[in-house]
């Protein structure tokens, strides 16, 4: 890879290396993963501390955050298309930091959920603007390569976050998790403020009016290729959120290995990180469609096997871990490429496109994940069923996007 960032759309170059650009975008996106994954070992302790008896309701700490994240994406996209990427990003990070810090001192579960919702609102800026900045700078397979590398770094967070959460609880309880979250995000805010330049150029700025915003939404929602891939990725993310919501209960209640939860969760995330790196190496030669369509078929196959086995027998821990690691390898090849395919036709409205796609993916996937998590019945059957159904729905949407043809190569860029 070249040391310098590829030319932006006006032919200029960004004043930071390609690797720093990728790392910064990855850390911006990792703010969301950190806010979710670092909480997973703490759900039981938070529930006990704040008087939440129903274990399934403790998952609302995750769902409230996802709700705020999803709703606010509709705001940050049009704003960033009008005023640029930098200041909306900085403002959103500031909201996130304040809400996370305040969460450390709450004494009621309802107030914690409200602050988690506000924290998600602030985090929406990172979800929308990181993708917009990448699309401002790259297109086609180059964007998929960068997105894969961003996902690779991004997936390091689920590897370390649950273990970090466990360590922080041992030091000073769950309250310290929120303080650590706010301080680490403050460091990312400083990095972005000093190093990330404005990537939205004047000719692509859109007026921030109701008419302009609705027109941007219309373009995104009526571009068949974009909306179908967005919905397909939403289904896949819904399954992933279901795993995140119920993982702690599965490892604790089904397999009785709660002490090993961070390491087992890290194994799944580690496979996703390795897979993302492989995707970045292969996508330039094979193209986004060949890789992602093949991975989707593999995803369906392994999820179908998991579901069938779960219906007839209790899966041993080793089999559960192997099957879900294999599924997550496929997920990494699906995620970065589907996201790039959805963004490819919409470079002229990148912020709004990222906003609408982020809203659909986060809210709908969060709802799907919450349903899967709340359906937990002491077995892995609900999770396995959710994964299989989501993967079949995703295939149907991809076939609709591609007019019934998989693996077709539209151009050397994609």
Image (cartoon, rainbow, N blue to C red):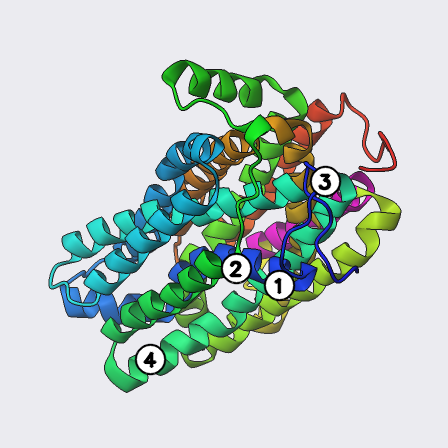
The N terminus lies in quadrant: bottom right
Residue found 33% across the figure and 80% down from its top: 168
Q: Tell me, yes or no, whether the highlighted magenta stretch contains residue 34.
A: no
Give the mark, 4 or 1, whose residue is nearer the N terminus: 1
Q: In this rendered view, identify the residue nearer to me: 32 or 173.
A: 32
Residue on which the image places disc 3? 11
Position in image of residue 285 (x %, y %): 88, 49
Query: Which numbered disc, 4 or 2, marks the residue closer to the eye?
Result: 2
Give the mark, 4 or 2, whose residue is nearer the N terminus: 4
Give the mark, 3 or 4, whose residue is nearer the N terminus: 3
Residue found 57% across the figure and 43% down from its top: 199
Residue on which the image places disc 2? 195
Residue 297 left/right relative to 224: right
Name above or below for residue 350 compared with residue 260.
above
Residue on which the image places disc 4? 168
Residue on which the image places disc 1? 20
Query: Which numbered disc, 1 or 3, marks the residue closer to the eye?
Result: 3
Position in image of residue 337 (x %, y %): 70, 44
Residue 296 left/right relative to 235: right
Q: Tell me, yes or no, whether the highlighted magenta stretch contains residue 305.
A: yes
Q: Residues within 10 Å of mark 1 (few under 14, many from 20)?
A: some
Position in image of residue 336 (x %, y %): 66, 48
Answer whether labels 1 and 3 touch (C-beta < 8 Å).
Answer: no
Give the mark, 1 or 2, whose residue is nearer the N terminus: 1
- Span colored in magenta: 288-311
Q: Quadrant of residue 50?
A: bottom left
């Amino acid at each position: 890879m070249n040391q310098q960032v590829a030319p932006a759309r006006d032919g200029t170059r960004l004043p930071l290396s390609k690797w720093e650009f990728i790392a910064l975008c990855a850390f911006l996106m990792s703010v969301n993963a950190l806010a979710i994954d670092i909480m997973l070992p703490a759900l039981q302790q938070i529930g006990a501390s704040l008087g939440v008896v129903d274990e399934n309701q403790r998952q609302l700490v995750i769902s409230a955050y996802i709700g705020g994240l999803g709703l606010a994406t509709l705001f940050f996209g049009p704003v960033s298309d009008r005023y640029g990427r930098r200041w909306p990003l900085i403002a959103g990070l500031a909201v996130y930091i304040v809400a996370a810090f305040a969460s450390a001192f709450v004494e009621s579960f309802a107030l914690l959920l409200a602050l988690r919702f506000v924290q998600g609102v602030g985090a929406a800026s990172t979800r929308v603007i990181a993708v917009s900045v990448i699309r401002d700078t790259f297109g086609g397979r180059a964007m998929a390569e960068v997105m894969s590398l961003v996902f690779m770094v991004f997936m390091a967070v689920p590897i370390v976050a649950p273990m970090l959460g466990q360590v922080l609880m041992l030091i000073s309880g769950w309250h310290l998790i929120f303080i650590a979250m706010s301080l680490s995000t403050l460091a990312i805010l400083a990095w972005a403020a000093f190093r990330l330049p404005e990537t939205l150029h004047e000719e692509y700025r859109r007026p921030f009016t109701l008419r302009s915003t609705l027109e941007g939404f219309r373009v995104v929602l009526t571009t068949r290729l974009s909306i179908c891939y967005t919905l397909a990725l939403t289904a896949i993310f819904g399954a992933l959120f279901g795993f995140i919501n119920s993982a702690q209960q599965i490892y604790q209640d089904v397999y009785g290995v709660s002490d090993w939860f961070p390491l087992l969760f890290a194994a799944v995330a580690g496979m996703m990180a390795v897979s993302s790196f492989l995707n970045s190496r292969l996508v330039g030669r094979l193209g986004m469609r060949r890789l992602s369509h093949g991975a989707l078929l593999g995803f369906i196959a392994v999820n179908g096997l998991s579901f069938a086995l779960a219906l007839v027998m209790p899966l041993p821990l080793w089999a559960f871990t192997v099957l879900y690691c294999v599924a997550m390898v496929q997920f990494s090849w699906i995620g970065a490429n589907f996201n790039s395919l959805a963004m490819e036709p919409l470079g002229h409205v990148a912020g709004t496109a990222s906003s609408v796609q982020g809203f659909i993916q986060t809210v709908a996937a969060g709802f799907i994940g919450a349903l899967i998590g709340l359906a937990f019945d002491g077995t892995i059957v609900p999770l396995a069923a959710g994964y299989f159904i989501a993967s079949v729905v995703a295939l149907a949407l991809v076939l609709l996007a591609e007019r019934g043809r998989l693996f077709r190569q539209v151009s050397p860029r994609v």
